[in-house]
Image: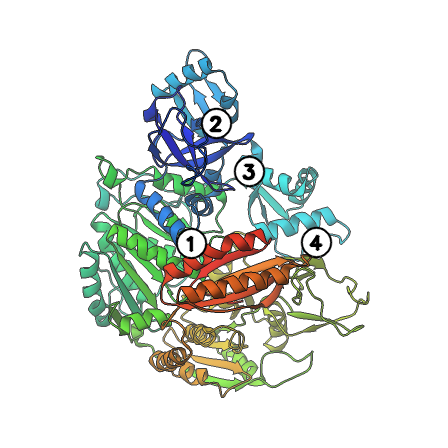
Amino acid sequence: MNIARVCLLSPPFSVLSYSLPGYLPEEAWQKGMRAAVPLGRGLRAGVILGFEAPASPEGPGAPAAPGAGAPARTFTLKSLIWPLEKTPLLSEEYLELATQMALRHTSTPGRILGAVLPAGLRTVKARLRFFGEGKPREMTPSSLASLPENELALLGRLWAEGGAEVCRAGQSPLDAEECRLAVDPPWPVRPAAKAQIALLEYLFEQGAVTRRKLAEDLGEGAARTLALLSGRGLVTVRPVDESLACDTLPAFSGEKPRPSPEEDMPFPFAGLPAEQPSRPGVKNGLPFILTPQQRSVMEPLLAAARSGRAETHLLFGITGSGKTAVYLELARDVLARGRSVLLLAPEVALALKLRDEAARALPGVRRYLYHGYQSPAAREAAFRDLASSPFPRSSSHVPPAPVLVTGTRSALFLPLSDIGLIVLDEEHDSSFKQDEGFVYQAKEVAWYRAGREKALLLLGSATPDVKSYYASVRGAVPLHVLTERTGGGELPDVRLVRMLPGGAQAHLLAEESVEALRRVVERGEQAVILLNRRGYAPQMYCLGCNAAAKCPHCDIGLAYHKGRERLLCHYCGYAVPFPSPCAGCGGMHFLPMGEGTERLEEHLASVLPPGTGVLRLDRDSTRRPGRMEEILRAFARKEAQVLVGTQMLSKGHHFPDVTLAVVADADLGLNLPDYRAAERTFQLLVQSAGRSGRGEKAGCVIIQTRNPAHYCWEFVRTADYAGFFERELALRQRRQYPPFTRLALIRISHATEDARGAESVAFVGGLLRAEGKNRGLTVLGPAPAPLPLLKGRRRYHCLIKGQDWQEMRSLFAAVRGAAEKCGLRIKLDLDPVNML
């Protein structure tokens, strides 16, 4: 009898050994299949990683065999309970991806899979129906575990003979219906109605959730409150959305098209102008004609996509140069040759825009949209649908029809087979790095998948990451350049405006900026204003004790959100109603300091001509499902002349009537304790400037700064990426920062009540320095993090410099055990993006 090695998909995420039960044939268990397994007194979901023969009738213990020299012990292995699907969910290639990521991050495959699989696939919630004589018998994994052997043997025969099926669990109304906000704040609810406010705030933060999850998180009284709010139209309850946004293009596959849920629905960005050259027409089924410069970069990119080798290329094109048209033409060619395509964007708004443009350019292609703001049911349905396609390398079946996936970084973990092209649009964006929970860099995952699939990885940006551009300068990555705006438009004129100091009531926009906005509005044109700070005011000062309201868990100022009537911590989510008594003196008189997008939107109504429409695009205004698309569509239809937003507004969007872009506070982020601070500021401002003058009218950009002498601004004014790159590269070489060295960040924290926490950190720091010296690494710290108190924990950073990733991983592994014994949390971040 074989032994199965199973990785658990929930804590402790271990790889454990289980025997195969006698009531099911061995062929019922396959590598890559999910299974219900016993652990302690309960059941867990796990993935079978492989099989091995036992060393003796009673093999090693449930974890792996004891170390050499350990006293011999014998264990009786527990048995697997039941498969959670009839065929493997994950291919061998997918398991290898999880294994390689576990090695890179000094983790386990179970922890990796537990982070990337949709939530519904990480549990044992399933219904198994057995069709014997009489009425079908319905069981759950838990009920199967308690059955006697003779009954299990009968059910096992039915399973082996095809007389059973696995159904998704929980189709009761509690699981089949989800709750969503129907109205943005402020809500017409009395301040004393705390249960109603709590439910509305919960949905505002969580998005769409099932009725069961709502009840689990808010308690039994949530059902009564939900009924009250839905009756008032503040909350909607509707069936769970599992639409896959998928159809099939017969010309590519030879298969009969299957209906798409999208066919009778408008695209989310219907009505938004596509980014097109001035000459209309159709080429190869696409609604555009490539410009000569676009055609010049297409030739080598097509050759790379058709080469049958793994290649990485960089497309460097100024804003408005038509990079998306190049992506789509490449996608058309790859799909026509029967291979699948991944189009990735750093943010949901850009992913939706890419999906819409792909749908128009490649009608009928079987396509999927995948991102973190979708409902769990939709994500799980998309994952299952792609996983059910046969794996070409391990099956003799006809390969599946190629698919086109658009999405954000998490789409890289879809079980997509035979990928021919992966595109990372705006490749410089820090959102491609996940630095909370499971830490990974999407560019690295994309590079790995492209290598395994022998695909083309195309990185695109108007402001490439310095390390990407350096690789192209050295000849490691082929570079393709687009220097002309499609349609012949010119880059906008950029002006600097000095921000003058003012009192608490002074507003952010300078008079010159306000006058420029008025002229744009009077001409019937449009403007965008970037302020990368959401909320009404970033600080609220108590006039009684002259202290700022702070988060008790993070020691960070609470931001005032006027629409929600809340003071919020943007780091841990702590919130208190406003007005509330001051925690220091009990006073009730506060002064808002600074300006966020909410306050700027309010101020514009008082300085622009009456009737001027102003919209706001930030995380708060787009919480409600579909609201982001509504805002962008309304602005595209010119229902508003001014759009205020955070950095989600700065890139990718194409509005031909926008002739003015204002960067309200360009200094934000410039002086952060991060070696990338100047690079990020340059990228953000050049991208923001690119929103202006994309049509036939000339554009203008106003950059407001307190420090007009900073070297960054001159490069921004001329959109001189090459000049900025040379200056930045020289600084990094002098200070030994990437790309001239490799960098890792070890984050250490302890609970605030731990009296010996600082002593433990110092002890672990000594171990790190000693181990680092032995391994040829430079260890700086530990030092208090720039945000020293977060979520009730004291935080410290150790910066590691060296040339070998493996040595950095080994250093971390060498001290992790000692740190955890001291009660510390310790985490490794290779090539960190967030230095706070």
Pointer 1 local density, CA inside 10 Å: few below 14, some 14–19, many at least 20: many
The residue beneath circle 3 is 177
Q: Is residue 709 visible?
A: yes
The residue beneath circle 1 is 105
Pointer 2 local density, CA inside 10 Å: few below 14, some 14–19, many at least 20: some
Give the number of the mark in front: 4 or 2: 2
Q: Nearer the viewer, residue 46 or 751?
A: 751
In the rendered image, residue 481, in percent from the top left (x then y), is placed at: 27, 72
Res. 159 image quadrant: top left
Rendered residue at 40%/43% (across/down): 244
Mark nearer the N terminus (4 vs 2): 2
Q: Quadrant of the C terminus?
A: bottom right
Mark nearer the N terminus (1 vs 3): 1
Pointer 4 local density, CA inside 10 Å: few below 14, some 14–19, many at least 20: few
Q: Amino acid at mark 3?
A: Glu
Proximity of marks 4 and 2: CB atoms separated by less than 8 Å: no
Residue 127: mark:
2
For the residue labelled by badge 3, is the local secondary structure a helix, a strand or a loop? strand
For the residue labelled by badge 1, is the local secondary structure a helix, a strand or a loop? loop
Rendered residue at 40%/70% (across/down): 656
Q: Amino acid at mark 1?
A: His
